[in-house]
Amino acid sequence: MSEPRSTSEPRDEFELIREAKRGSNVALDRLFRRYGSRLLGLIRLRMGPSLRRRLESQDVLQSTMIKAFERLEQFEGAGETSLMGWLGAIARNEIRDQAKFHGRGARDAGCDVPLEVMVGAAAEPLRSEVSRIHLHDQARRLEAAIEALEEPHREMILLRRFEELSFPQIGRLLGKSPDACRMLYGRAMAALTVRLSDGGELGAR
Amino acid sequence: MSRARELFERWVEARVVDGRTLDLDTLAAGDATTRRELAHLIAGFRAVDEALPSPSALDEEPRRPPPSLERYTVLELLGEGGMGEVWAAEQVTPIRRPVALKVIKKGLDTAQVMLRFESERQALAAMDHPAIAKVFDAGVTDDGRPYFAMERVDGEAITVGCDRLGLSIRERLELFVKVCDGVQHAHQKGIIHRDLKPSNILVRDEGGILQPRIIDFGIAKAVSADLASDATLTQLGQVVGTPAYMSPEQADLENLDVDTRSDVYSLGVLLFELLVGVRPFAESPLARLARTDEEPPTPSSKISSLGDVAQGLAQSRGADVSTIRRLLKGELDWVALKALHPDRSQRYDSPARLAEDLRRTFRDEPVLAGPPGAAYQVRKFISRHRVGVGVGGALVLAIAIAVGGLAHGLDRALEAEQRALAESRLSQEVADFLADLFERSDPKAERGESMSVRQLLDRGARRISEELADQPLVQARLLLTMARSYRGLGDYAEARALHERAVEILQREEPESLELAQASHDLAETLIVSGALDAGEASAVESLELRRRLLPEQSLPMSESYNQLGMLRWRQGRLEEALEMQQKALDIKEQLLGPADGSIAKLLNNVAILRWEAGDLAGARELMERGLAIFERDLGPRHPHVASNLNNLGLVADRDQDYASSVVYHRRALAIREEILDSLHPDIAESLNNLGVSLMRSDELDEARRVLERAVEIRLEVLGESHVETASSLGNLGQLLGRLGEAESGRGLVERARSVFSSTLGPDHHYLAFVHLWLAELDDGEGDLDGAARHLQRCREIRQQQLGDDNPLLFDCVAPLADVLRRRGEPADADEIRTLEALAAEFAHGD
């Protein structure tokens, strides 16, 4: 507390997660405000329109957040990646698992996402928080445009902008050089711009 | 693929891959259609970049993109500062020439900046002097930022150049005199620089002789007094002037505007720095105003105070410390002090005068500056004899004001020569009187004892009436000074008596003067703080009316009058009028001084509190954050004002249901207060109480309990059981105990609070609504839904009656009441529940 200015900064995300785990609704609320809609946007894009018809993106968001809570210690040890990158990786697995699960045609209401493993205190508020997150119109238009991109372009924008990975990190993930990723990212941004400009989505701002 | 698309991809690639921004015109190569399409796509890229979630790949860019402008080819980034960036560029049409482009950072109202620049354009064009870099042009970049194109000067900051070349004191003075000549030339053309500092005064080596070039003329004015967003707020010190070089009147609330003498002051700081190697003051003028007993040091004494550092500084001036000290002592000291005089009427009235005096030292002629006069000696005397630091400071302030021209407004608008003469005679008489008063031998002083401030004042007041009966204006002025000092000491009766005498004299002698307006204003202030609101109102209105006749609406005294009336309305409980008045006061000051001026912080706070009371929480918070930033900048992070501001922010955040922020604000306020106040100070209890409540709302119940118990402890000790604040803390703690499962003890505390509220505030006061709220929660916790519903109903009734139907506090009982009724599940309540829920939704939406 010796430096008042620094304490006014938004609280550190580790601390928020820890507090949320201890049952602080305030911290949970903060976390959701900070990451919820971005993560939802990412999940929807990763799922794509066809999977979205079979699977509720909000369910995936919820289970991703729950997994993240459980595995907090892993993230603190992981060091390099961003929290969004880490959440993005969990979300990818979650989408894959749930797609398989639903792919088997199981629609048994009793076999929903494993909420039970959730740390008791946070489970209930978490459910209600998830239902509050929705995408704005602008995000919807952006989503449609990103979805219409070629796969490598879309992936680039997801990794760079949604998961906040650096070009060297993306390079390692995709087995490409950072410069190649940078180049690809540039083309992706150009393509996205053209797509939105053609649709008249980007009028005078 | 179209030509524009192809070019656009090249543009994006250059930008993303190697952080370069290709020039639009070069790419389009004269094809207007392509250029238009390309510009559209580039704008689209920026929009997409902003719309995507994370803060953009541009973070990784090795450098910022150059602005793209018609008529210029942008070459490279020369530097970045608080105001924006400076780029080397080449003007292409109508003539080819190298220019420096100053691109102002985002956040200013571009149209306003251009407007102010245009108003000076003619004068700027008329400037023609070897020491002045010309400003050629101004305009707006593609992304809407104002830019200025000026002569490109390849040079270094004057202080850097002098040190690098190891210039002697004499050589530095000769260079400085050239700077003065340049500034003088600009003043003659009607241009004030407003931001003179070493980085705006570049030097070049021209055939072995350093030549100065002053840059940025006309720019500070264009960008000052304007700020559209908070983002640039913290940098404002850099934008509108650099605090270390800024004259006190730029921070002083009593002055109408900045004139050429403000540049003289900045030159004084520069002179000091060239001579000594450090600036006279370490901190901003505002921080200095808070400690008025601080005189500017003389250059020679400053260098003596620097210890080991002085050695190196002397070396870069080609001499040892004692030689430098000898060179500076006496005339150069006096010249520097005169240039740096806090009162501009005592400064050199032009850069030319300053330069002349320095040239006299070259010729070993006596300087005009001379040793410090009576006023200086009086202040020195007082600072030697002052009693308690705080009180002494107040007195010194009062005296300094008297000497320096007490009648702040003294009609600068008229500024007739005669008036100025009379004024200076008046000041001199006041100064003489004070000097005499304080220096006349005093038996106690001779015995080595210091008199108390009170004794000094009493003696002064007595002599004013005895000895000055035939000099009414001097008498009035001194009476006002004394009155302020008495007010500072808390003796309102004496202060009022002296103020009234001063007003009487001025009504007789100078009935249509700003001086009378000021005296009435001061009298009103004294009346208001002493609680005589009706009499205060009469005086305040009188002052306002008089000022309105003599001054334009947009003037600082008018702002002061509005402020005063606003505070009065506030105390009278007329909040809407209070807000209107305070807002007017704020608008004027922002207009005249800019939105981050130190003197507007309190107004920001006042308007914020009034908006908050009117239910505009977001607006309140924004203003308070601005006020906080100013206070922290000017007063340091541990000042009581900073703590009060944080406390208010905590309360607003709490009301806004942002409890996490509220806790943080209150913790910060508490930490400051614990550090600077006595451990039993009521303000500490206030912070503890507020922190406790926010912690409770954040469900941090254990800590909340510890904190609230300390609040109760201090308040019981300091304020006693029957104080409203003690009762509030008791009630809050009672509510908390209920949540912790100790309903019975909780109820006991709440009942104690209830009896204090109803006996001290009366049975209908809206504070009793809190009691019902607390009791409702206790009942609810014990499963008594009927009791809870009853108390919530009562709470709602009280608040509706006392606060009106639209007060946000109603939400606190409406929403829980709906909840309790729903849980009670009586079919008869269904309509009521619907009504309540609609109301609650309305409140929530209104936020």
Image: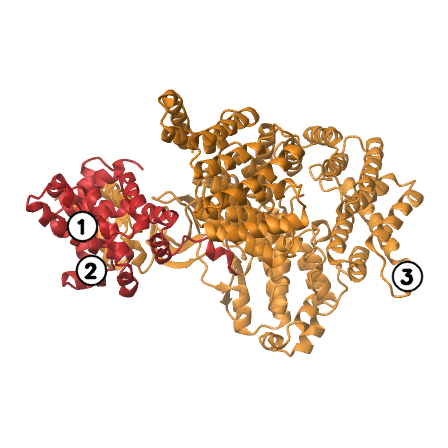
- Mark 1 neighbour class, 10 Å CA radius: few under 14, some 14 to 19, many 20 or more: many
**Vertical position of residue A33 compared to residue B549: above or below:** below
Q: CA distance from mark 3 to mark 2?
A: 82 Å
Residue B684 shown left or right of residue B460 in the figure: left
**Vertical position of residue B319 compared to residue B460: above or below:** below
Task: Tell me residue B726's x, y (percent).
Answer: 62, 44
Q: Which residue is mark 1?
A: A188
Instruction: Give the numbered dot on residue B49.
Output: none
Callout 3–callout 2 Cβ contact below 8 Å: no
Q: Which residue is mark 3?
A: B444
Task: Tell me residue B817's x, y (percent).
Answer: 43, 30
The colour scheme used to paint the residues is: by chain
Task: Tell me residue B107's x, y (percent).
Answer: 43, 44
Q: Secondary structure at mark 3?
A: helix
Instruction: Give the numbered dot on residue A170.
Output: 2
> Farthest left residue?
A104
**Residue B577 appears in which quarter of the rendering?**
top right
Q: Which chain is red?
A: A
**Residue B274 appears in which quarter of the rendering?**
bottom right
Q: Residue at x 67, y 57 (%)?
A: B340
Callout 3–callout 1 Cβ contact below 8 Å: no
Q: Nearer the viewer, residue A27 or B201?
A: A27
Q: Secondary structure at mark 2?
A: helix
